[in-house]
Image (cartoon, grey):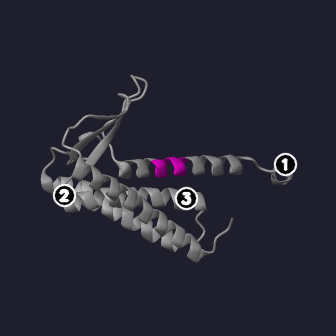
Amino acid sequence: MKLNKTWRIVVFLLLIVINIGCDQITKSIVRENVKYNAHIQLVGNNFILTKVQNTGAFLSLGSTLNPVLRDILLLAFPAFIIAVLLVWVFIKNKLRMDILIGLSFIIGGGIGNIADRILYGSVTDFLHINLGGIFRTGIFNMADVSVMVGMFLLLIGSYIKKGKSDKIPAEQSKNDSL
């Protein structure tokens, strides 16, 4: 289904807003209803709800940095990247829909975590997965899920696009060799 430029931008912005909304609503529920470091089993000991405030990035990286440097690396730099991505999307008219969707998830998740840093000085993380040694995560939030889903969509889209461009029609290949 081909959408005109206006509808593509509407879908793009709507997905960003939905990602921010899901992130901020879940964080608000956790902030109001879960005590710090609570250990609430949602699905056995495999899916756990526990509230922490993360002043760093992934797995608390950067939490011990000088506050000015931390603000530059975890607030200003991500905000700059998000602004660049937004401008790029609005300038580029021919982006494939899978790229737009992936970028909307990344931007929405990024804005969700930036909003936490501005409003609370840290990011509220609350989800933890432990599949018995097979797969285990740190504590994360819905913004992190949005960013990871967006990255996955971009990687899959890139792989699919690369696969299509690798298949040169036999007629074209024969003509190119002459």
Q: Residue furthest front?
A: 33
Determine crowd level at label 1: few under 14, some 14-19, many 20+ residues with C-alpha closer than 10 A: few
Labels 1 & 3 near each other (Cβ < 8 A): no
Up/down of 21 relative to 45, above or below: below
Q: Residue furthest bottom?
A: 6
Q: Residues within 10 Å of mark 2 (few under 14, many from 20)?
A: few
Of label 2 and label 3, which has the lower sequence position? 3
* Residue at disc 2, secondary structure: helix
Sequence order check, earlier mark of 1 and 3: 3
Q: Nearer the viewer, residue 50 or 34?
A: 34
Q: Which residues are magenta?
A: 149-155
Q: Which residue is mark 2?
A: 120
Q: Residue type at mark 2?
A: Tyr
Number of numbered labels in the structure image: 3
**Distance of mark 2 from mark 3, alpha carbons?**
31 Å
- Report the amino acid beneath label 1: Ala
Task: Give coordinates of residue 52: x percent, y percent.
Answer: 22, 43
Distance, label 2 to label 1, CA atoms, is 59 Å
| The image quarter in which residue 7 lies | bottom right
Location of residue 61 in the rendering, given as x and y in whole percent from the top left corner = 24, 42
Kindly state the secondary structure of the residue where label 3 is placed. helix
Camera-nearest label, 2 or 1: 2
The residue at the far left in this view is 66
Q: Is label 1 or label 3 in front?
A: 3
| Residue plotted at (54% across, 47% down) | 155
Q: Nearer the viewer, residue 124 or 156?
A: 124
Residue 47 visible in rendering: yes
Q: Quadrant of the N terminus?
A: bottom right
Which residue position holds label 1?
170
The residue that mark 3 highlights is 99
